[in-house]
Amino acid sequence: MLQDELPLVARLLRSQRVASLGTLADGVPFVSLVAYVVEDDLCSYLLHLSDLSPHTRHLRADPRAALLIAEPETAEVEDVQTLARITLSGTVAQVGKNSPEYTTGRERYLARHPAAAMLFDFADFNLYRFTASSARYVGGFARAYTLTVDHLRQAAAGTIPQ
Amino acid sequence: MLQDELPLVARLLRSQRVASLGTLADGVPFVSLVAYVVEDDLCSYLLHLSDLSPHTRHLRADPRAALLIAEPETAEVEDVQTLARITLSGTVAQVGKNSPEYTTGRERYLARHPAAAMLFDFADFNLYRFTASSARYVGGFARAYTLTVDHLRQAAAGTIPQ
């Protein structure tokens, strides 16, 4: 049941540091690796992207995007189909450099990614927020669920959804 | 220089068992986790997908796809921006169940993913081939390269490209 999976969803979204970002390259699928940090509500994800990257150009042309967050493959995993993963569908918007959100977002991002501090001095890097509108969670074989934003919020709050 | 990176490209593509598959969900980006095995030429990737999965429906409507293959995140990695990754752009086609390619493809796939053997008895699972037409490799910060199919073949052959 989905309600049994929500604590696992919350743990997965909070445990990783990288996601696969899906964007549209002139209408063609593109996927790149990005560092992220999740906000408390599990609906909002901060990314720090360079203007020089293909995905940033794609997002400026079309803000629709997907984020895949997955348990990493290790040698100990016998069957990779058992790796937990979640696909978040949503849109990406830039966080204005003079906004209060930028200051708090940068702090949150750097608390998770201290090695990225120097990149905040580069003029071509900007902070972006991915906002999820739905999600698909696969906990393993025959454990696939579609999640709403409310499910993500319930997972975030640790409450048991109805 | 790109020619110095090609051995690393070959190692990365051969070392992993899962990739992030980018597809179009009615024109919207979607990314899911898939098991894969690469062919010797590094241009062709075998996937074993269920008709019940969203990505399979997407590919039947539009075969254009991307595969991201990345070094997995581990606790030892201080800066996740240093993780090597490659985005392959291409198209996906089903391998006919009565073709000789199916037999050799299944053998190759199962040699890499023995735990998937039982899935070959399920009627909703089919074998697919992703064929790359170009790639973008990021070996780390400021080490980004666009690769052609010829580069992939050169990486596969272990020859030094001109």
Image (spheres, coloured by chain):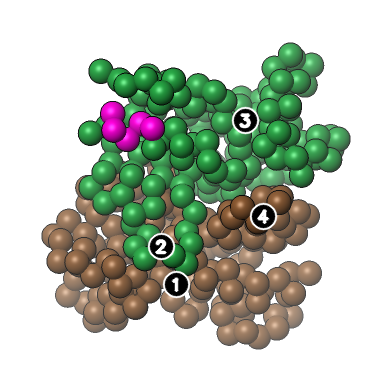
Chain colours: A green, B brown
Residue A150 located left or right of residue A101: left
Residue range corresponding to the magenta coloring = A3-7
Label 4 vs 1, first from the N-terminus: 1
Mark seen at residue A46 = 3
Mark seen at residue B38 = 1
**Disc 1 element:** strand
Q: CA distance from mark 1 to mark 3?
A: 33 Å
**Contact check, label 4 and label 1, Cβ < 8 Å:** no
Q: Is any atom of residue B63 visible in this view? A: no
Residue A145 drawn in magenta: no
Do the dots labelled 4 and 1 sit on one chain?
yes
Label 2 vs 3, first from the N-terminus: 3
Counting every numbered tag in the picture gives 4
Kind of residue at badge 2: Val
Q: CA distance from mark 2 to mark 1?
A: 19 Å
Mark seen at residue B77 = 4
Identity of the residue drawn at 58% across and 45% down: A18
Q: Chain of mark 3?
A: A
Q: In the figure, residue B120 lies in which quadrant?
A: bottom left
Do the dots labelled 2 and 4 sit on one chain?
no
Where does the C terminus of chain B fall, quadrant-wise?
A: bottom right
Q: In the figure, residue A121 lies in which quadrant?
A: top right
Q: In the figure, residue B24 lies in which quadrant?
A: top left
Which residue is outermost to the top?
A: A100
Q: CA distance from mark 2 to mark 3?
A: 29 Å
Nearer the observer: mark 2 or 3; the answer is 2
Identity of the residue drawn at 41% across and 70% down: B37
Nearer the observer: mark 2 or 1; the answer is 2
**Disc 2 element:** loop
Q: Nearer the viewer, residue B118 or B149?
A: B118
Q: Disc 2 marks which residue?
A: A77
Q: Main secondary structure of the magenta part?
A: helix
